[in-house]
Amino acid sequence: MKLDPSAALAFLAGDAQADRVVPPAGFTVRLTLFTSAAMAFLMVFALALSLAAGRLAATWSAELSQGATLRLSAPAEQMAAQTAAAIIVLQTTPGVASARALSADEQRALLAPWFGPDLPLEDLPVPQLIEITEERGGFDAEGLRLRLAAEVPGAVLDDHARWRKPLVRAANALRALGWVSILLIGAASAAMITLAANAALAANAQVIEVLRQVGATDGYIAQAFVRRFTLRALTGAAAGTIAGLIAVSLLPSAGAEASFLTGLGLRGWHWLLPFLIPPVLGAVAFWATGVAARTTLEGLS
């Protein structure tokens, strides 16, 4: 069914006599309300997941593309000289903003999650790490590797490319999965509401036949069902959306120690997007009920 703008207010206001055609309570009412609420709740989380994955993809790409690491292996008596030579090479490389050798405490902190906080770095052949910060345009990694091979043979450059691409690809795939989930939830909502509408129409076949005998048109009867089911879907979706927003707001917020699981919440204007879910599900219910009503009424003819 289609509504033109002039009929929108009449549709929302309804017709008390026509509304009696649709049962005000019963299984189909509970099914429509529950389905709409549950699907809206899931949509909020799918939306939050998709938006969070998009943020992660952008963050990981930006952070990993602006940094690199140089790993330097050399005998203990040559480490200081090799480190100084490597830093000179880096400082004279176009595209490198800064280069800094990590202290023993910093390297110990990096290794602590695997080897514990009391790792004796002084007694172990641990490579020296040099942190590289890139300029916006980046640097020529292959050219730098050739210079390092000639001047600091024990240096190994890691520009994070092998880590960056899989992470960004995984985050983008997760974002796409979130949007696909939203589409599937919408399709499942349409299917469930269609089943509920068909059940209500079939249960009221005798009432519909009486209405036809007194002159009611199929369009009049169908509009009564469409209106009732659309408003029920809107009500359930609004309740589910509010519940979903409350649940999302209780998720851990992203902070200094943020990981993927602590960044699933909504941010900024993204909090407004879930409020589109009730009208979207209402539109799905309007379309699905209209199709179900026309098909079932034709079958009862």
Image (cartoon, grey):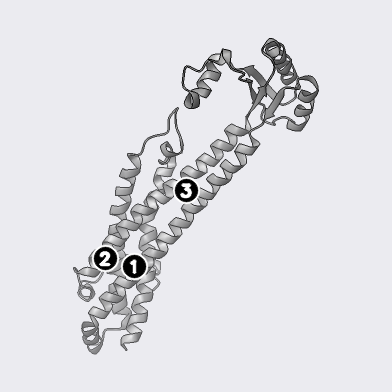
- Within the image, what quadrant is residue 155 found in? top right
Image disc number at residue 156: none
Residue 137 x, y percent position in the rendering: 69, 31
Residue 249 x, y percent position in the rendering: 34, 40
Badge 1 amino acid:
Met
Q: Earlier in the sequence, mark 2 or mark 3?
A: 2
User: Outermost residue toward the front?
Assistant: 123
Image disc number at residue 192: 1
SS label for mark 2:
helix
- Within the image, what quadrant is residue 234 found in? bottom left
Residue 200 x, y percent position in the rendering: 26, 75
The residue that disc 3 covers is: 50
SS label for mark 3:
helix
Q: CA distance from mark 2 to mark 1?
A: 8 Å
Residue 100 x, y percent position in the rendering: 63, 17
Badge 3 amino acid:
Ser
Q: Tell me if mark 2 has few (under 14), some (14-19) or many (20+) residues whose alpha carbon lies within 10 angstroms of its own.
A: some
Q: Tell me if mark 1 has few (under 14), some (14-19) or many (20+) residues whose alpha carbon lies within 10 angstroms of its own.
A: some
User: Answer yes or no: do the residues labelled 2 and 1 have beta carbons within 8 Å?
Assistant: yes
User: Outermost residue toward the right?
Assistant: 150
- Above or below residue 212? Residue 269 is above
Badge 2 amino acid:
Leu
The residue that disc 2 covers is: 31
